[in-house]
C-alpha cells in the first residue's frame, strides 16, 4: 500500500484549502498548477498559482520542494535526519517601476511576513519601455516544513491573501 510522504500530505493540504477558496468561496481563482517529479535528480516540486477573483492581475504562488535527500531520509527512516519540504511563496506583478514601486513592495511584504528573506527579481522584454518591469517577489523560508506545521497552512494562506490585497491597493496608488 502507498504511504504518502510529507511532500504528498502538505501538497494535498494546500490544494484542499486553495481549491475550496476557488470553487466554494469564489474568493480566489487558481491560474496555474505544477506537480513535477524531476527524474534527473529525483526531486519533487509542487506549485499552485492564484489571484484574487475580484482583483486579477497580481498573483501569488506557493511552492513546495523535496529533494532526493529529504525523500530518502523519510522513506528509509534515516536516524538523525529531519526530512521535510522547502517552502517558497512568490508574488508576481507587471508594470512595476523600479525606482518607486520595489521599495513599497518590499515594505508591504516585510510588514506582513516579518523576518523572512525577500528577493525581488525584475525583468522586461528587450525593446519595450525601459522603466517598466515585471516583478517576481519571492519569500524564502529558512527551514523545512513538515506535517507538524500542517495547522499553519490556513494562516499562511490568509497572509498570502492579505498580501495580494495590500499589493493591489498600494500598486494602484503608486
Image (spheres, grey):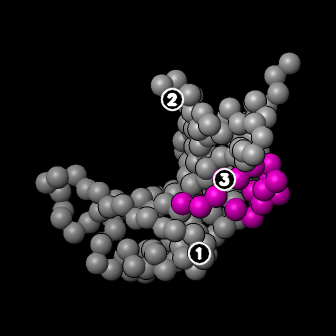
Q: Kindly identify which residue carries mark 1.
A: 115
Q: Position of residue 105 (x, y in %)?
A: 45, 74
Image quadrant in which the N terminus is located: top right
Left or right of 89, for residue 6? right
Q: Position of residue 24 (x, y in %)?
A: 77, 48
Spatial CA distance of label 2 from label 1 is: 31 Å
Query: Residue drawn 58% across and 48% down?
Result: 63
Q: Kindly identify which residue carries mark 2.
A: 41
Quarter location, residue 88: bottom right
Q: Position of residue 47 (x, y in %)?
A: 58, 43
Where disc 3 sits, the SS reads loop
Front tag of 2 and 1 = 2
Looking at the image, the residue that sits furthest to the right is 1
Question: What segment carries the magenta color?
Answer: 140-156
Q: Kindly identify which residue carries mark 3.
A: 144
In front of the other: 135 or 64: 64
Where disc 1 sits, the SS reads loop
Q: Is residue 59 magenta?
A: no
Q: Residues within 10 Å of mark 3 (few under 14, many from 20)?
A: some
Query: Residue drawn 38% across and 74% down?
Result: 102
Spatial CA distance of label 3 from label 2 is: 19 Å
Amino acid at each position: 500500500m502507498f504511504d504518502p510522504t510529507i511532500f504528498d500530505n502538505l501538497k494535498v493540504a494546500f490544494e484542499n484549502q486553495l481549491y475550496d477558496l476557488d470553487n466554494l468561496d469564489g474568493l480566489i481563482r487558481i491560474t496555474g498548477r505544477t506537480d513535477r517529479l524531476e527524474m534527473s535528480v529525483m526531486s519533487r516540486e509542487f506549485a499552485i498559482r492564484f489571484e484574487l477573483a475580484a482583483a486579477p492581475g497580481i498573483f501569488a504562488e506557493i511552492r513546495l520542494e523535496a529533494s532526493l535527500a529529504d525523500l530518502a531520509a523519510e522513506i528509509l527512516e534515516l536516524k538523525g535526519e529531519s526530512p521535510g519540504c522547502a517552502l517558497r511563496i512568490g508574488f508576481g506583478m507587471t508594470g512595476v517601476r523600479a525606482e518607486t514601486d520595489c521599495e513599497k513592495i518590499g515594505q508591504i511584504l516585510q510588514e506582513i511576513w516579518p523576518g523572512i528573506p525577500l528577493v525581488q527579481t525584475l525583468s522586461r522584454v528587450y525593446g519595450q519601455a525601459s522603466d517598466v518591469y515585471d516583478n517576481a517577489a519571492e519569500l524564502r523560508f529558512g527551514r523545512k516544513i513538515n506535517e507538524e506545521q500542517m495547522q499553519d497552512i490556513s494562516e499562511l494562506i490568509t497572509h498570502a491573501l492579505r498580501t495580494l490585497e495590500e499589493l493591489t491597493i498600494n500598486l494602484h496608488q503608486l
